[in-house]
């Protein structure tokens, strides 16, 4: 029954930056300029920083909605790790049993595992089951008790969370592109931190002032503020 008994790191507040922060806090990997674990603020900046975006959706069977975006969403997780020079060990499998075996093997090595799970399938999120809604995000697994059928989770809460084996398997297997994906990470390369920060700032500025990598300029940055303001003041636009 592998469990990291000294794991008590639940400060992460976002799936991507929070998961990495929690893992580095547990493994006592610190930023060179602070002597403390890499903060979520720093990781957010490296990943591309903040932005503004808005998107209007009107799907059949759902109420119309306007979603506001506050952070860079163009591959921020991979960009963050790549810019910091983080070596990654990734496993994937189509088999739930093999996925659990890989997870147990990781925990037995004394390493917390980052796995991807569908947020609609995680019971502690209290979201209504919906075939038309899904989203895969990283969470940290730091233990598994087979006898009690309990998986120990760190996920955006200041307290431990728990799943059964079948609940975790369902959440990990729902979305094809992230199916039973498991990640462990090595320490960042401190020599790459300055350039990583500069690249993140550059991304942030460009997303506010230039055409985005995908989508229209009206949906991102300063232009989005202007366009949204016009839509609100003149709803017939």
Image (cartoon, helix red, strand yellow):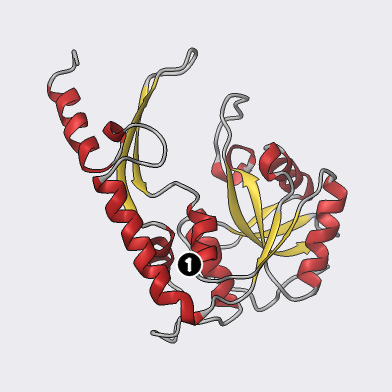
Disc 1 target residue:
11
Percent x, y for residue 29? 55, 81
Percent x, y for residue 77? 52, 56
The answer to whether residue 111 shows anywhere in this view is: yes
Residue nearer the viewer, 46 or 65 = 46
Residue 211 lies, with reference to residue 42, above or below; the image says: above
Q: Quadrant of the C terminus?
A: top left
Residue nearer the viewer, 51 or 139 = 51
Q: Quadrant of the N terminus?
A: bottom right
Which residue sits furthest left? 233
Left or right of 219? Residue 108 is right
Left or right of 210? Residue 123 is right
Dot 1: element: loop
Residue at the image point whose x is 19% and y is 23% from the top: 231
Residue at the image point whose x is 18% and y is 17% from the top: 235
Residue 91 lies, with reference to residue 177, above or below; the image says: below
Residue nearer the viewer, 134 or 221 = 221
Residue 229: name its quadrant.
top left
Residue at the image point whose x is 87% and y is 49% from the top: 97
Count of all numbered marks drawn on residues in the image: 1
Q: Badge 1: few (under 14), some or many (20 or more) residues near its Cα, within 10 Å?
A: some
Percent x, y for residue 232? 17, 25
Percent x, y for residue 100? 82, 55
The answer to whether residue 156 shows anywhere in this view is: no
Residue 121 lies, with reference to residue 147, above or below; the image says: above
Residue 33: name its quadrant.
bottom left
Residue 119: name its quadrant.
top right
Left or right of 52? Residue 17 is right
Left or right of 186? Residue 217 is left
């Amino acid at each position: 029954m592998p469990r990291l008994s000294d794991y008590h790191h639940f400060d992460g507040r976002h799936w991507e930056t929070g998961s990495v922060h929690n893992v580095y806090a547990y493994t006592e990997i610190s930023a060179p300029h602070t002597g403390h674990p890499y903060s979520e603020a720093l990781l957010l900046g490296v990943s591309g920083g903040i932005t503004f975006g808005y998107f209007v959706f009107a799907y059949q069977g759902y109420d119309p909605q306007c979603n506001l975006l506050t952070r860079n969403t163009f591959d921020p997780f991979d960009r963050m790790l790549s810019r910091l020079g983080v070596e990654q060990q990734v496993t994937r499998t189509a088999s739930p049993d093999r996925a659990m075996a890989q997870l147990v093997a990781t925990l037995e090595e004394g390493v917390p595992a980052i796995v991807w799970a569908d947020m609609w399938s995680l019971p502690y999120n209290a979201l209504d089951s919906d075939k038309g809604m899904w989203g895969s995000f990283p969470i940290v697994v730091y233990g598994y008790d087979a006898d009690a059928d309990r998986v120990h989770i760190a996920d955006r809460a200041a307290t431990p969370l728990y799943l059964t084996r079948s609940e975790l398997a369902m959440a990990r297997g729902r979305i094809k592109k992230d199916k039973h994906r498991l990640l462990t990470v090595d320490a960042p390369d401190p020599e790459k931190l300055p350039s990583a920060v500069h690249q993140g700032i550059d991304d942030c500025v460009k997303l506010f002032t230039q055409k985005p990598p995908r989508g229209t300029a009206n949906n991102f940055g300063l232009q989005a503020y202007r366009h949204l303001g016009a839509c609100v003041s003149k709803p017939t636009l």
